[in-house]
Amino acid sequence: MTVVNTGSERIPEGVIERLPLYLGVLIQLRSGGESTASSARLGELTDINPAQIRRDLTHFGSFGKRGVGYDIATLVERIQRILGADHVHRLALVGAGHLGSAIADYNGLRQHGFLVTAVFDNDPAKQGTHIGDLVIQDVSELEDTVTAQGIEIGVIAVPPHAAQDAADRLSATGIRIILNYTPVIVRVPPQVTLHNTDPVHELLHTLYYLSKTEGVART
Amino acid sequence: MTVVNTGSERIPEGVIERLPLYLGVLIQLRSGGESTASSARLGELTDINPAQIRRDLTHFGSFGKRGVGYDIATLVERIQRILGADHVHRLALVGAGHLGSAIADYNGLRQHGFLVTAVFDNDPAKQGTHIGDLVIQDVSELEDTVTAQGIEIGVIAVPPHAAQDAADRLSATGIRIILNYTPVIVRVPPQVTLHNTDPVHELLHTLYYLSKTEGVART
DNA sequence: TAGATTGTTAATCGATTAACAATC
DNA sequence: TAGATTGTTAATCGATTAACAATC
């Protein structure tokens, strides 16, 4: 008997972090014409132990066929369903500078069902101009627009001094997920999930491993 | 006796990932005029168990004073030294579009000693124009420039179809750290540390937790 | 000295992985 | 049936945390 979703079992964070990796290589394999993949193959492509992949997947059910492997098409669907990536999510982007434009242009988001449907900036010179198809609006319109469009996710891409204001306005709309690309610590109410993305942190810890492996040239 | 650096002890990855967090709040406290911080205080600000903070730090020596706490100024210096953030690192940026411009403008990098000192793009229309003080060069000049300037780190911010070429060119220069902002899997030689930064992955696993806590509105 | 907080030990907890029976 | 690969158990490994002696 196949248990599809035991519901109340707690899923370790590491598992959830690996699912998007599996999804990525599965989509890659599918576009390469493959229809089936073993945990060994997925392990090669993701650098993750095959036993761990199998174990991760069993948290959500048993999707494979013994002696055969996993059907790529159905596994892609299952993982998308698990992650909530099986339907469209609308995003409000705050900040229409270079970073905001890069995010709005970013095809990867669209491909996974994340649609930027509104852009805000507090610079009057930008308001009324376009990013792609979208008219840049004043941040005062944020709340009404979020409600009207059913936007679920906010993205902050403003200069540091404006980040907290953006976070406050987004939180006030009832939005529950905020991605912050500004390298500043912002405070949000407890019911809001905040994700800070700071390239400096990544550089810093990558740098550490470099200095360990061979010593950075210090000219 | 204080052991400054035991040298050959293997440091868990999690420790290295937390150091930049400690560094961030220490810098924040310092700019707020504080001179000393206890592990309990750092724990509040980072949401990390104080015992873990103390344990993390002892991997590198003993920096605190019992009954008092940690001297912020010296701890900042020690962590910067540990991470290799105590001196300047030069970056080569490949891709001069919106994303590349955002990275070049990004003050957070400069504040931590990461200087973008060269920008490349294979679009002839962009070559010769400026980003900040930097002239955009053709990617064919990458190797010579990296050598001449002592650049240690490459950053990829090009469209997906150009990402592998950028990775190959950067690897060929002898660079050992590459940060890839393009949502595409690139291959690099084993001696190169590659860091893929994909906002989609972050959205996907953040989304999972949202759907668990209360169920996403599916209108 | 009394109070505070570190550095460190030991216990707990959880995650990873090897191994293998089940089964396609 | 023979070969392959899953799902699952059990062992290992490592990371987190509580507790406390050391000591400022």
Image (cartoon, coloured by chain):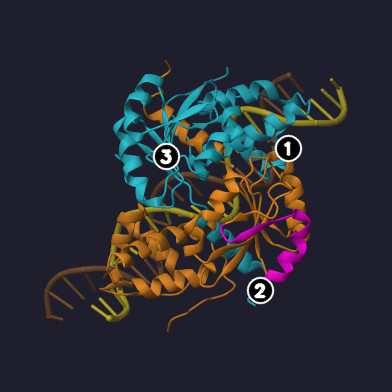
Chain colours: A cyan, B orange, C brown, D yellow
Marks 1 and 3, how far apart in space?
A: 55 Å
Residue annotated with mark 2: A217
Does A145 sit above or below residue B144?
above
Residue span colored magenta: B132-149
Q: Earlier in the sequence, mark 1 or mark 3?
A: 1
- For mark 3, give the secondary structure: loop
Q: Position of residue A164 (x, y in %)?
A: 33, 46
Crowding at mark 3 (Cα within 10 Å: few <14, some 14-19, many 20+): few
Q: Is residue B42 left or right of residue A112?
A: left
Instruction: Choose mark 3 or mark 2, whichever is in front.
Output: 3
Does D6 sit above or below residue B2?
above
Crowding at mark 2 (Cα within 10 Å: few <14, some 14-19, many 20+): few
Residue annotated with mark 1: A40
Q: Would residue B120 be counted in the magenta stretch?
A: no
Q: Earlier in the sequence, mark 1 or mark 2?
A: 1
Q: Quadrant of the C terminus of chain A?
A: bottom right
Query: For the residues tagged 3 and 2, is the chain the same?
Result: yes
Pick the residue in front: B113 or B121: B121
Q: Amino acid at mark 1?
A: Ala
Instruction: Tell me which chain the residue with mark 1 is part of.
Output: A
Query: For the residues tagged 1 and 2, is the chain the same?
Result: yes
Q: Position of residue A182 (x, y in %)?
A: 44, 48
Residue annotated with mark 3: A125
Q: Is residue B103 left or right of residue B35?
A: right
Say which residue appears at 48% left-offset and 25% top-offset.
A89
Question: Quick check: marks 1 and 2 in contact, CB under 8 Å?
Answer: no
